[in-house]
Amino acid sequence: MCLKQLDQFHIRKQNGKYYGWKIFHKNGKHLSGRFFNTSHIYLVNQWIHDRRRARIITYGLSYVPGFHIYTSKKEAKLSIFKQYETVRKVEFREVVQLGKEYAAKVVVAKQMKILPVKYSK
């Protein structure tokens, strides 16, 4: 996933934390990256760090890489293309960029924690 437009918007905190929605590749009970790190299994309820530093240059934009997280569950679900993709609620921190994937607001963050399924409903 790549940002199509850089943007600025307010991200609301809930109880002092940031939450959003991320699309994952699902293989049985395992979750992995949708486009990157597709062979790496992400653990639920543990902080995951994106340590890449080289800037991404795409669609004429340049930004620091990270996890692309939707601000809306509805927008995330509308962006699923394959039956083995799933949307999960995540907590995130260390925001490096705000932007849009088409009309959907997306946060790029360096750290995320996948919340247990009961929080993704």
Image (cartoon, rainbow, N blue to C red):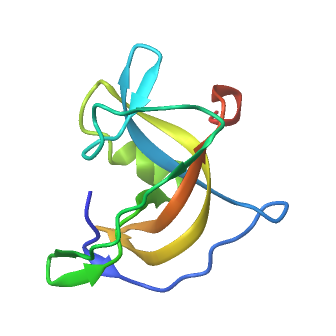
Q: Is residue 114 above or below residue 3?
A: above
Q: Nearer the viewer, residue 55 or 8?
A: 55
| Residue 121 left/right relative to 24 | right
The structure residue drawn at horizontal position 62% and vertical position 35%, both measured from the top left corner, is 120
Q: Quadrant of residue 46?
A: top right
| Residue lying farthest to the left in this orientation | 59
| Residue 33 left/right relative to 96 | left
How many numbered circles are shown? 0
Picture coordinates of residue 6, whole percent (x, y): 35, 83
| Residue 100 left/right relative to 108 | left
The structure residue drawn at horizontal position 70% and vertical position 27%, both measured from the top left corner, is 118
Q: Quadrant of residue 34?
A: top left
Q: Quadrant of residue 62?
A: bottom left
| Residue lying farthest to the right in this orientation | 15
Picture coordinates of residue 105, whole percent (x, y): 44, 68
Picture coordinates of residue 49, whole percent (x, y): 50, 54
Quadrant containing the C terminus is top right
